[in-house]
Image (spheres, rainbow, N blue to C red):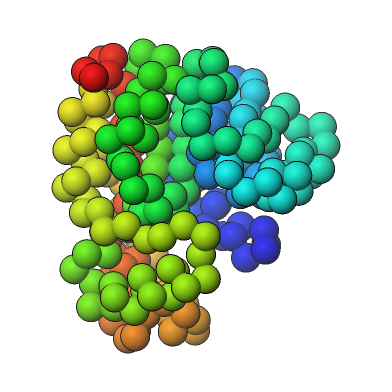
Amino acid sequence: MEKEHQMGWKNIISKIDNADIKNKNILDFGCNRGGFLRTLFDNYSFESGVGVDLAEKAIEVANASALNYPIQYIQTNNILSLERKFNTVISTSVLYLIEDLHEHFDKVNKILLLNGVYYASFTDQTKNPSEEYMMEQINLYGATKMQQHTLTDVVELLINYGFEVELRKEYIDNTYNVTNFQEFYLRVEDYIQSLNESYLIKATKRAESRT
């Protein structure tokens, strides 16, 4: 499974500022089996990393694979229970599964140090012609239901919770591998639309949560 994600992880890592990772304390929200944090460390060594996920078996696999990495994996979705602060929080392909973004961004703000950074990959699928089909597939096989957040929803909420927000295009290559487009899309055009509207959000904490 990790081999299938390596290309996507490396693409995201290439868009993260080294200064936000090098010698910093990192939290990976929704870490699954932990491969992203290990890949991140292989590219930019950080001081310490914590990965959190609700899936017990995934966390067991992650900890078994941690070896000599300065990483700990914990089964929880309440990041406040970690009772520590981080320089950088990262979530990859997670926001579209979170029902209450207000609560999520509030907690991220509270565990970040001032001027800390939250990186989150996100694609607004609300105007994609294949959205209904995609939701059916994700909701049928996934443990968590797909939500219908817009990019504006996400950005406005982050601003309201004290973040300065910038968007970085996730895919800038003019070559598209469309072999497996039918997994979640009805048309190739819909798949390409999704890629073109995918962003890595960089949200920098400039103020404490207003709640």
Q: Is residue 128 left or right of residue 71?
A: left
Q: Can I make out residue 40 in this image?
A: no
Q: 7 and 72: which one is in front?
A: 72
Residue 62 location (% of width, % of height): 72, 44
- Which of the image's four quarters has the N terminus? bottom right
Q: Residue at x 36, y 35 (%)?
A: 104
- Count of residue discs: 0
Q: Which residue is drawn at 54% across and 30% down?
A: 27
Q: In this view, does 204 lie to the left or right of 30?
A: left
Q: In this view, does 74 lie to the left or right of 119?
A: right
Q: Residue at x 65, y 34 (%)?
A: 74
Q: Which residue is drawn at 64% across and 23% down?
A: 48
Q: Can I make out residue 203 in this image?
A: yes
**Quadrant of residue 198 in the image?**
bottom left
Residue 50 location (% of width, % of height): 62, 30
- Which of the image's four quarters has the C terminus? top left
